[in-house]
């Protein structure tokens, strides 16, 4: 197992995915800050609630929110740059993940999908991740509203199921070879546990 890890250069593949993930994090923060500026403008009670939340402890945004009386600003150009950078960085993550999956499954490069199909698969994975984030948030909010104090275990179980489904779908979509769910279920279970 460790020899296979080394033969596939899994460490290098993982660092490439992490590099692109870090590259997509900064546009996401720009987009988040800009949207937060729009939402908080004219709502001092909401602004105080955000400052008192975990966001108030966030290194840059929290410090700015706590020590200034002016709200964060936002404009359409920052939103456009944030969305563009986020899509570009996310596609880098998905392309690196596809290369890693194809390398691990020993699929020859000539059998990899063409340029456009790789981008389409990448966008599909990004869409699945986005929907899963929304589903996890909605599940946690619904569990809290419906079940009250018992919400934490229900939300946790739902989150585990959503994450398992995301890993299963991602492993199937990211690999150029047509795999069955039985081929990737163990990897999806392990990924969910470690996630």
Image: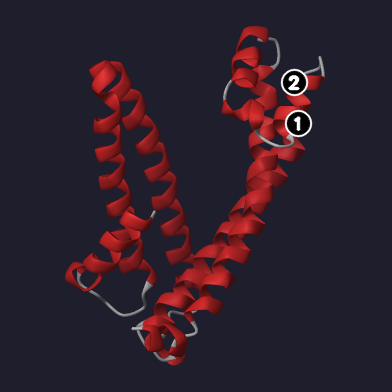
Question: Mark 1 or mark 2: which comes first in sequence?
Answer: 2
Check disc 2 and report the residue beneath it: 66
Which residue is at 26% across, 32% downward? Answer: 153
- Front residue (pair 141, 175): 141
Residue 176 image position (x, y, % from top left) = 36, 78
Q: Which mark is residue 75?
A: 1
Q: Nearer the viewer, residue 140 or 194?
A: 194
**At numbered mark 1, what does the secondary structure look like: helix, strand or loop?**
loop
**Left or right, 54 with reference to 118:** right
Give me the residue at 17% from left, 70% from top.
Answer: 182
Q: Are marks 1 and 2 in contact (CB under 8 Å)?
A: no
**Residue 88 placement: quadrant:** bottom right
Residue 126 visible somewhere in the drawing = yes
Q: Secondary structure at mark 2?
A: helix
Residue 16 in the image: state x and y as whole percent: 58, 72
- Quadrant holding the N terminus: bottom left
Hey, which quadrant is residue 147 in on the image?
top left
Disc ID at residue 195: none
Q: Is residue 115 visible?
A: no
Q: Quadrant of the C terminus?
A: bottom left
Residue drawn at the location 43% of the way across and 79% of the way down? 113
């Amino acid at each position: 197992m460790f020899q296979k890890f080394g033969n596939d250069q899994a460490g290098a593949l993982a660092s490439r995915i992490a590099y692109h993930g870090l590259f997509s994090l900064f546009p996401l923060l720009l987009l988040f800050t800009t949207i937060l500026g729009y939402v908080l403008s004219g709502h001092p009670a909401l602004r105080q609630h955000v400052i008192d939340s975990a966001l108030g402890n966030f290194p840059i945004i929290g410090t700015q929110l706590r020590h200034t009386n002016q709200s964060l600003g936002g404009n359409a150009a920052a939103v456009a740059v944030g969305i563009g950078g986020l899509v570009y960085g996310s596609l880098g993550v998905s392309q690196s993940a596809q290369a890693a999956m194809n390398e691990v499954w020993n699929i020859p490069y000539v059998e990899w999908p063409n340029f456009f199909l790789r981008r389409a698969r990448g966008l599909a994975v990004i869409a699945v991740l986005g929907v899963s984030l929304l589903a996890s948030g909605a599940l946690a909010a619904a569990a809290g509203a419906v079940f009250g104090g018992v919400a934490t275990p229900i939300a946790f179980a739902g989150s585990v199921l959503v994450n398992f489904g995301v890993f299963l779908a991602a492993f199937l979509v990211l690999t150029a070879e047509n795999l069955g769910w039985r081929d990737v279920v163990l990897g999806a279970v392990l990924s969910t546990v470690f996630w």
